[in-house]
Amino acid sequence: MPLRDDVVDAREGAATSLGELSDAWLVGRARELQVIGQHSDPQARDATRREADNLLTEARRRGHPRMLGQLLCCCATLRLCTPGMAEQAVPLLDELLTHARRHRLDVLRADAHALRGRLALLDGNEDNALNQAAEALVILDDDLVPDAALGRRSWERLLATSLIDIGLVLTQLGVFDIADEVMARAHHRIRESGGPHEIATHLINRCRMLLGWGLRLERIGKQDDADGRFSTAAQIAVAVDGPWQESLFPRVPGRKAAEQMPVLAAACALAEPDGSHIDKLEEVSDPGLELPVQETIIIAIALARCYDSAERPDEATRVLSETRQRIYEDISEPSLRISLVREYARRARLDPDNTAAAVEEYAQELESELWTMRASRSATLMARLDRQRLNRQHHAITRQAMHDPLTGLPNRRALDAKLESMLREPDAQPLSVALVDLDGFKEVNDQLSHAEGDEVLRVIARTLSDTLRADDLVSRYGGDEFVVLLPGVELEAAESALTRTVNAVSRLPGSLSRGVTLSIGVVAMLPQESGSEVLARSDTAMYQSKRRGGNQVAAMSGDAHHGDPAEPPAWIPPESEQ
């Protein structure tokens, strides 16, 4: 399928220095590549994946958490949809999960679990896929707060994408009723903030789910219900044309979506199978496109029924037989595989007498049992969801005792425990300890509101976490003070790292920081020094930063705190936050 002119232009633009391009361009290009990579021939798919990897390298260099998370998700998805490359997605998904947990990017964390579910299905591990889907749903069950740094619309897009990925896993598992509920949640998010591409993607995935559902209903004799699903899918195939024409999908101008997208062509054919669909189905099912197994099966069944309607039974048998051979070793679509085998068996039986009727009746009994198993799977999923919710409630209670409710950072109790443990850990030495105080924070509370002050504290807390290492502990110690522990870091290196943090806060938009900056004092832990003693010295260093005008870091060596009579004689810890 040829690429649109604007896609080609964007690809040529990507050849320029990535360092000169904005974060928004990198994320937008990644979204585009993800679409191209799933709807292209193998050669274009390889080029797309290489370009996405270059974007990921640039994202790692820049280190912006949200951009990096989205690039990891894109590169993992491209590998999952490329035959023979699924295993390469494993380290990317592991990195995405770790990254999302550290930066509290819950929507991306849920999507990582959904993508792990897709990976499990490629390996034939349905139980693990179900667990991953349940974990993702539990994360999104929470009363999520939109990420202000992303913006409401971008955050809603990510949430919709995560829900769709969960719905696709549930569709492959045959848990159609719950998949339908998840897709409905995605529809609500897309309706609020989605553009043409998000709307088109959602409608195509919903069409795909309805076709699988209809084929499953046929197998247990619920033909009227199945026809209803096919009819709705065909209506969606027509309705999607508007947003599809403005989407990121590669397409031929002037042709309808149902003439280019395999699943949409199949939807129209299954609703009213006749010879008029044959040419379109043959065109979109070109083996050179390497379609996903799901679409390969659905198109084969639709094409066979159209051949039958056109009185070309031999060709119907041929396409079903060839498809069975083509997907023989693929175990990623268990429900659709049975539909394909059933379609072929109904045509290929040699003896139409009573024996054949008895075999078909026995097969019907087996199908009823499989339907019961489907209901059991739904019940299993709901039970696992309940268990996951209980586990999360337990963890939430434990976390509440050790974390500040406003910022989500470890609280004073957690800091004291960690500091004492680091004193006993040889690997933690050298240990640098920093006390962070906000310049101008009182004015925010006095001149704006305490609610604005709370939001500033959240922004500062997130920036501290984002700009420091995963091994560093950032904690809220009380009021507008934070403490940072930097294990294994000499004083000079700690000063340099914290200076980057000061600069990052000073560059924040005024709408987020309200003009607040940081004064930081950092010291190196001395041998035999207690936690309270090292905090007292870091407090003294912080006051030195304040006297110099703030918005900077003051580093003090072990003997420097004795020679400054202007410093407070003793350090008084702030009152604990309630």
Image: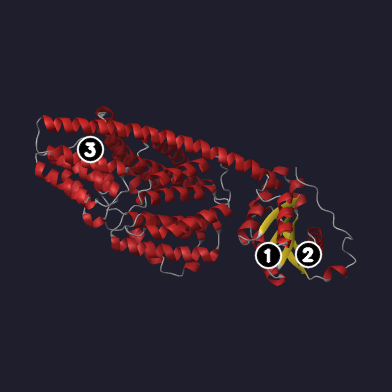
**Circle 2 sits on which residue?**
545
State the mark number for residue 489.
none
Assess disc 3: are there few (<14), some (14-19) or many (≥20) residues with their C-alpha within 10 Å of its C-alpha: many
Q: Which of marks 2 and 1 is in front?
A: 1
Which one is closest to the eye, mark 1 or mark 3?
A: 1
Image mark for residue 270: 3
Q: Position of residue 494 (x, y in %)?
A: 69, 67
Residue on which the image places disc 1: 428
Q: In this view, does 416 lie above or below 242?
A: below
Along the line of sight, which residue is nearer the eye, 416 or 72?
A: 416
Callout 3 amino acid: Leu
Q: Going 23% across and 37% down the picture, which residue do you hit? A: 270
Q: Is mark 2 on a helix, strand or loop?
A: helix
Q: Can residue 519 be seen in this view?
A: no
> In screen coordinates, is 266 left or right of 534?
left
Spatial distance from mark 1 to mark 3, Cα to Cα?
65 Å
Q: In this view, does 243 lie to the left or right of 255?
A: right
Q: What residue type is labelled 2?
A: Ser
- For mark 3, give the secondary structure: helix
Q: Quadrant of the N terminus?
A: bottom left
